[in-house]
C-alpha cells in the first residue's frame, strides 16, 4: 500500500494575490503582523528592508529619533508600523510570494512607486470602508 500525501497550499492570510488587503488600525508591532500573515518575523524584516530601500513614502512613515554620537535624526526602524506600512508590506509580500525573487520585487517597486503610495493606500482603504458600510 502506498501513502499518497497531498498537501494543498492555502494562501497565507493577507497575502493571496486576489484578496483584499487586511487593514490594521493604529500602530502594529512587526512581530504581530508577521504572526497574522503566518510568516517568520525575519521574512517580514526582509520585506521591510526592500520597502524601506525603494519607497520614500514608506521610509518617511517611520518616526525619527536621534541616533549615533552626533544624534542625527534617522528613521526609528524599531518603531511599530503604521496602517500604511502594514498595507505596503502585504503588497510586497504578495509580490514575493508570486515571484520568489527579491530583485524582481525591487525592480517592480522602482518602476511603480505610485502603486505603493500613501494616496493609493487612502483611496483603497476608503473603497473598502464604503463597501462594508
Image: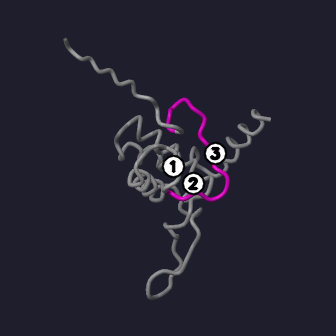
Between disc 3 and disc 1, the foreground one is 3
Residue named by callout 3: 23
Q: Does 60 sit above or below residue 110?
A: below
From which residue to which does the magenta span run? 15-30
Q: Main secondary structure of the magenta part?
A: loop
Is 107 in front, or is 131?
131
Which image quarter is the N terminus in?
top left
**Residue drawn at the location 47% of the way across and 47% of the way down:** 109
Q: Does 9 sit above or below residue 118?
A: above
Quarter where residue 130 is shown: top right
For this orientation, the residue located farthest to the right is 133
Residue named by callout 1: 89
Q: Residues within 10 Å of mark 2 (few under 14, many from 20)?
A: many
Which image quarter is the C terminus in?
top right
Tag 2 near tag 1, CB within 8 Å: yes
Residue named by callout 2: 85
Whole-angstrom CA distance, mark 3 to mark 1, is 11 Å
Q: Residues within 10 Å of mark 1 (few under 14, many from 20)?
A: many
Which disc is residue 60 wearing? none
Amino acid at each position: 500500500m502506498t501513502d499518497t500525501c497531498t498537501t494543498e497550499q492555502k494562501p497565507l492570510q493577507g497575502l493571496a494575490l486576489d484578496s483584499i488587503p487586511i487593514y490594521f488600525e493604529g500602530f502594529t508591532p512587526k512581530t504581530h503582523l508577521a504572526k497574522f500573515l503566518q510568516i517568520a518575523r525575519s521574512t517580514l524584516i526582509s520585506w521591510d528592508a526592500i520597502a524601506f530601500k525603494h519607497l520614500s513614502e514608506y521610509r518617511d512613515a517611520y518616526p525619527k529619533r536621534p541616533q549615533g554620537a552626533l544624534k542625527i535624526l534617522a528613521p526609528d526602524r524599531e518603531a511599530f508600523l503604521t496602517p500604511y506600512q502594514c498595507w505596503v508590506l502585504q503588497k510586497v509580500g504578495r509580490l514575493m510570494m508570486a515571484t520568489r525573487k527579491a530583485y524582481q520585487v525591487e525592480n517592480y517597486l522602482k518602476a511603480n512607486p505610485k502603486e505603493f503610495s500613501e494616496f493609493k493606500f487612502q483611496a483603497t482603504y476608503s473603497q473598502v470602508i464604503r463597501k462594508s458600510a
